[in-house]
Image: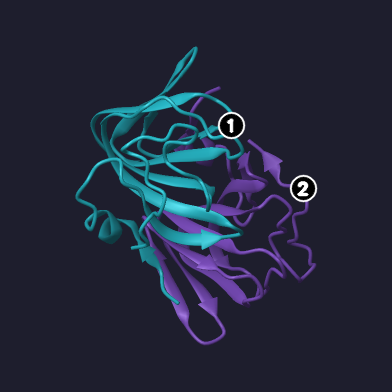
Chain colours: A purple, B cyan
Amino acid sequence: MKAVNLKEKFDKIHEHWSPRLLGELNSQAVKIAKLKGEFIWHHHENEDEMFFVIDGSMTIKLADQDIDLKQNEFFIIPRGVEHKPVAKDEVLVMMFEPMDTVNTGNVESNITIKNVQKI
Amino acid sequence: MKAVNLKEKFDKIHEHWSPRLLGELNSQAVKIAKLKGEFIWHHHENEDEMFFVIDGSMTIKLADQDIDLKQNEFFIIPRGVEHKPVAKDEVLVMMFEPMDTVNTGNVESNITIKNVQKI
């Protein structure tokens, strides 16, 4: 058993909006991703989702407000709430969510990733 | 709804080994704590527990190895595994575990905290 170093893991990611699985506990996934640009509007029917900013800044757009996040800030998006992550510049995020959460939630598109790679 | 800033939350904590609740998602707790010194040996019967170091460094002692953790490193302690957190100097940690997890696990003592304060 060993510690997981986030910097080493982020160095292995060369695409945006492509989450990787780092660990699992209590049926929950610990994922990381590099984000840049605009994602799509979506929601997760049965899963709350946490975005924790490790480096950089981003905005989680909700229907009626923008949640701005910078390093060492997090936000929990309650299940069912429409949201759209946006990052002007590249941001490194850690996500907590149930193991079966799909990145685009209720919307299936060409950016949907159903099998998240473990690194 | 608003972002949670870890620095602001840590500034409200003035004791060691006293976890605070920052949020809940999918029946899981997001907690933070300031640790310094040696905790007790214990395990959690039915809960995996994640320690993520926000600032500083610490060691999670296991029966047969030491897991050293520094900033931006995490470790998931599987349920049932005996462990003892130790921090030579103060360390700031985020923890992720089921809502009903008690800090001293199977050991009840004068440092057991059953009702974690939300901040």
* Badge 1: residue crowd in 10 Å (few <14, some 14–19, many ≥20): many
Task: Judge by depth and name the residue closer to the eye, B43 or A67.
Answer: B43
Name the residue carrying label 2: A115
The disc at residue B59 is none
In the rendered image of this protein, does residue A90 appear above or below residue B67? below
For the residues beneath circles 2 and 1, the answer to whether they share a chain is no
Q: Is residue B79 left or right of residue A107?
A: left
> What's the chain of the residue with tag 1?
B
In the rendered image of this protein, does residue B37 appear above or below residue A35? above
Q: Nearer the viewer, mark 2 or mark 1?
A: 1
Residue shown at the point (31%, 32%) measured from the top left: B57
In the rendered image of this protein, does residue B89 appear above or below residue A1? below
Give the Cα distance between marks 2 and 1.
24 Å
Pick the quarter of the image with the C terminus of chain B: bottom left
User: Percent x, y for residue A109?
Assistant: 79, 67
Task: Give, as a three-letter code, the residue at label 1.
Answer: Pro
Q: Secondary structure at mark 1?
A: loop
Residue shown at the point (56%, 22%) measured from the top left: A1
The disc at residue B78 is 1
